[in-house]
Image: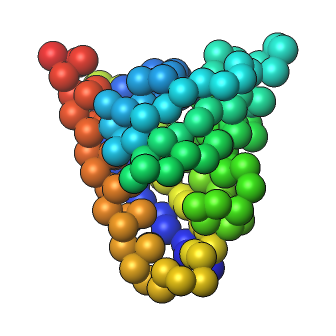
Amino acid sequence: MISISLKQSLAARPSQVRETLLDHEHLNRFFNATFLLLKTQNEGEIRGGKGSIRQVSMLGGKFQEQIISADDKHISYQIMGNKPVALHRGDISFDTDNSSAMATTEITYNISCKAPWWIPSFVLGFFIKKDITQALKKLATHFKDVAL
């Protein structure tokens, strides 16, 4: 089983981060994939939140992710099915940092999954960690540019 946990500080409020990460069709600004919203959120849920299903296209393959829950404190999602990885779960937590005059949010991004039998877990883990680290840096730059 692969488990990855990364942190990033952003110059934004948790609600801004949540709205940005739930803007499914524009996530390609941060992640090396394209996203297509297949199903909107369940009735009564926040925009892009619980029940949303998005198609992710990357490296010539396609798979679907479903938002399990979403609010100003976290977003949880999972890959539907067992491909390209099995038992995939992503949890993104938002913590407000009030120690400075400017609103900042500390993101903790946790991913767990099981690699297919033909890819060593440490290799897949390396590439997932690299991609998420890059995405978090792009997200930080996005909010830095917005604040200017």
Instruction: Please provide percent x and percent y for residue 114.
Output: 63, 74
Q: Is residue 115 left or right of residue 4?
A: right
Give me the residue at 84% from left, 14% from top.
43
Instruction: Please provide percent x and percent y for residue 3.
Output: 55, 72
The C terminus: image quadrant: top left
- Residue at the extreme left: 148
Name the colour scheme.
Answer: rainbow
In this view, 66 is above or below 126: above
Query: Looking at the rendering, which quadrant does residue 10 occupy?
Result: top left
Q: Is residue 20 left or right of residue 143?
A: right
Q: Nearer the viewer, residue 20 or 94?
A: 20
Give me the residue at 19% from left, 22% from top.
145
- Residue at the extreme right: 43
Instruction: Please provide percent x and percent y for residue 71.
Output: 66, 29
Q: Nearer the viewer, residue 74 or 25?
A: 25
Give me the residue at 62% from left, 33% from top.
54
Q: Nearer the viewer, residue 57 or 66?
A: 57
Instruction: Please provide percent x and percent y for residue 138.
Output: 26, 39
Give me the residue at 71% from left, 23% from top.
39
Residue 30 visible? The answer is yes
In this view, 74 is above or below 124: above
Query: Looking at the rendering, which quadrant does residue 102 occupy?
Result: top left
Q: Nearer the viewer, residue 21 or 114?
A: 114
In this view, 111 is above or below 77: below
Q: Is residue 148 left or right of residue 146?
A: left
